């Protein structure tokens, strides 16, 4: 199956940022490429602002996606920073920023590619400002007609066709093209007046036009003053006008004539400058509409994913006479990376676990789903607690990329013996209220998160718990939530909230309320908390 992005690439748009990075082709299906400073990177970028393992690009039949790998300085798409491990689709015209570099998704697959010729000695001038007052009435009429046609266009190709239609009948405009850059010397033809054949573009004109000005070969230049390449191709006059959208050059209008044919009139440059200015506004409108549609679709997809995720959570309250729980989870985004489950096994145990997958968003949510499903299956079959945790760990190591892990605390309550088993995999936020005493943090040494190393050897501890005790579990979104001053909510505040609560529901309700009041704004991370009533 051929990807619809076979002819696309990530093209550096900050050539002076340093490093000598070449365009990165986005070819093939089911391909993944690492971007970073490490020698393992398929696309190595020597910039101190880029992490060793900064981001990853995924090329699939459905599209091209970029994923931040927990980089220090972040990965940005169109100015919006991705969360750690977050993956988003990137499309033509999108700008991906990493460190001091910016890259544009350039090019679409098309039947025609154009290349530039090197003509450094060509006599070229830039049109610094246009003079519409000097345009003939016919050109003014064409400009007005083009403006009307731009108002009803819905795609870039439609805008390009309208540009070609407005220019192709002008005197001296033998060949008219609207092209998009694919690399340093390759261009994709969006629209044209003729099949390009062996035509090459003037590199000098492109370089001049990339500054944002209309550039043209000087009219009447003697043969011996033109570059060898232009003489060989018999190019008499040529013009290149940049079409900008959102402050960046999106594509170019390129016009030329050969042989003894009519040359481009002097005021055509002014006409083209006015034309591409209007066309750029039309493209901005189209890009805005596309962005809004993508945002709307993403919101719908994320809401659906969140609804599906909530189906995996148990009810907010549950249990029986010997054990019960109250649980609350609030995602930092639509889809969270926190997990919680509670089940009564066939042998009478109450099994439960609460954890946090790295990152936020869909990627973390999928990690959570896989881990939750496996643990529930193992514990439901009667597998011992530490054995179940170790099997889930080894499975996560096998299927996950480096840097992806899950912190987790899991437990089993044996009501007949009043023994509580606890296994901590790098989580740490465990609290116990017993015998009317203040809540205390339970510490389990030597634990590592799931997915960090194979055969980690997680071991469960066993506690004899008196009747009426409460075990409280919290995600790092509770403890590590910060306020406007950068201060964390912290363990001390958790203990204070628990000591002021009279029951399970009040413990969780007051904790969530206290964290939200402390944040006084959007939550920085997923927030989950559960209390387990032990007899």
Image (tube, rainbow, N blue to C red):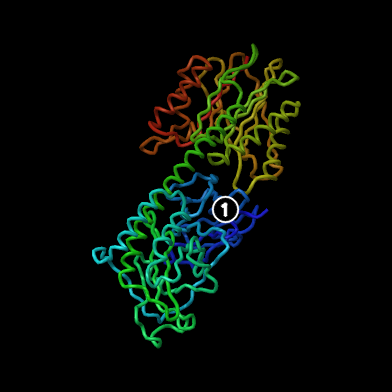
Q: Residue at x 58, y 50 (%)?
A: 63
Picture layout, residue 199 above or below residue 519: below
* SS label for mark 1: strand
Location of mark 1 (residue): 56
Residue 428 in view (yes/no): no
- In the orientation shown, which residue stands out farthest toward the top? 321
- In the orientation shown, which residue stands out farthest toward the bottom? 224
Q: Residue at x 69, y 42 (%)?
A: 456
Picture layout, residue 453 above or below residue 130: above
Q: Residue 37: name its quadrant.
A: bottom right
Q: How many other residues sit within 10 Å of disc 1, few (<14), some (14-19) or many (≥20)?
A: many
- In the orientation shown, which residue stands out farthest toward the left? 133
Picture layout, residue 136 above or below residue 262: above
Horizontal and vertical percent position of residue 255? 42, 69
Front position in the image: 477 or 110: 110
Front position in the image: 403 or 42: 42
Residue 494 in view (yes/no): yes
């Amino acid at each position: 199956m051929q990807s619809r992005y076979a002819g696309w690439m990530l093209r550096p748009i900050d050539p002076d940022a340093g490093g000598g990075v070449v365009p990165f082709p986005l070819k093939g299906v089911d391909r993944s490429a690492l971007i970073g400073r490490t020698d393992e990177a398929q696309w190595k970028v020597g910039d101190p602002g880029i992490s060793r393992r900064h981001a990853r690009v995924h090329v699939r039949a459905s599209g091209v996606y970029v994923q931040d790998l927990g980089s220090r300085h972040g990965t940005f798409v169109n100015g919006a920073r991705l969360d750690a491990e977050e993956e988003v689709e990137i499309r033509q015209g999108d700008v991906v920023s990493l460190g001091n570099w910016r890259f544009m998704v350039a090019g679409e697959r098309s039947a025609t590619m154009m290349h530039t010729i090197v003509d450094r000695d060509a006599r070229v001038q830039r049109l610094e400002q246009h003079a519409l007052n000097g345009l003939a009435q016919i050109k003014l009429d064409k400009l007005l007609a083009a403006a009307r046609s731009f108002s009803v266009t819905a795609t870039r190709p439609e805008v390009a066709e309208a540009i070609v239609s407005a220019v192709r009948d002008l005197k001296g405009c033998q060949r008219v093209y609207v092209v998009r850059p694919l690399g340093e010397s390759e261009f994709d033809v969006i629209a044209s007046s003729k099949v390009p054949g062996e035509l090459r573009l003037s590199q000098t004109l492109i370089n001049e036009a990339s500054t944002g000005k209309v550039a043209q070969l000087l009219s009447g230049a003697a043969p011996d003053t033109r570059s060898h390449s232009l003489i060989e191709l018999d190019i008499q006059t040529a013009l290149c006008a940049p079409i900008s959208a959102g402050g960046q050059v999106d594509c170019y209008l390129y016009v030329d004539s050969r042989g003894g044919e009519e040359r481009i009139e002097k005021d055509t440059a002014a006409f083209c400058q006015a034309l591409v200015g209007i066309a750029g506004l039309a493209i901005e409108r189209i890009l805005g509409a596309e962005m809004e549609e993508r945002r709307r679709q993403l919101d719908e997809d994320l809401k659906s994913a969140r609804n599906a995720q909530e189906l995996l959570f148990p009810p907010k309250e549950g249990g029986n006479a010997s054990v019960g729980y109250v649980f609350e989870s609030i995602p930092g985004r639509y889809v969270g990376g926190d997990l919680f489950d509670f089940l009564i096994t066939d042998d009478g145990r109450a099994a439960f676990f609460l954890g946090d997958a790295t990152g936020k968003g869909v990627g973390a949510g999928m990690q959570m789903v896989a881990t939750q499903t496996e643990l529930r299956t193992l514990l439901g079959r009667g597998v011992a607690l530490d054995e179940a945790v170790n099997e889930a760990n080894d499975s996560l190591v096998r299927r996950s990329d480096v840097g992806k892990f899950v912190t987790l605390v899991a437990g089993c309550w044996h009501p007949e013996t009043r023994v509580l088993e606890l296994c901590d995999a790098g989580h740490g936020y465990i609290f116990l209220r017993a015998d009317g005493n203040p809540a205390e943090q339970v510490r389990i040494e030597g634990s590592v998160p799931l997915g960090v190393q194979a055969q980690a050897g997680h071991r469960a501890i066993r506690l004899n718990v008196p009747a009426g005790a409460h075990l409280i579990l919290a995600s790092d979104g509770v403890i590590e939530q910060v306020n406007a001053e950068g201060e964390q909510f912290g363990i001390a505040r958790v203990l204070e909230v628990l000591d002021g609560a009279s029951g399970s529901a009040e413990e969780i309700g007051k904790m969530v309320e206290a964290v939200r009041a402390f944040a006084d704004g959007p939550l920085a991370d997923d927030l989950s908390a559960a209390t387990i009533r032990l007899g």
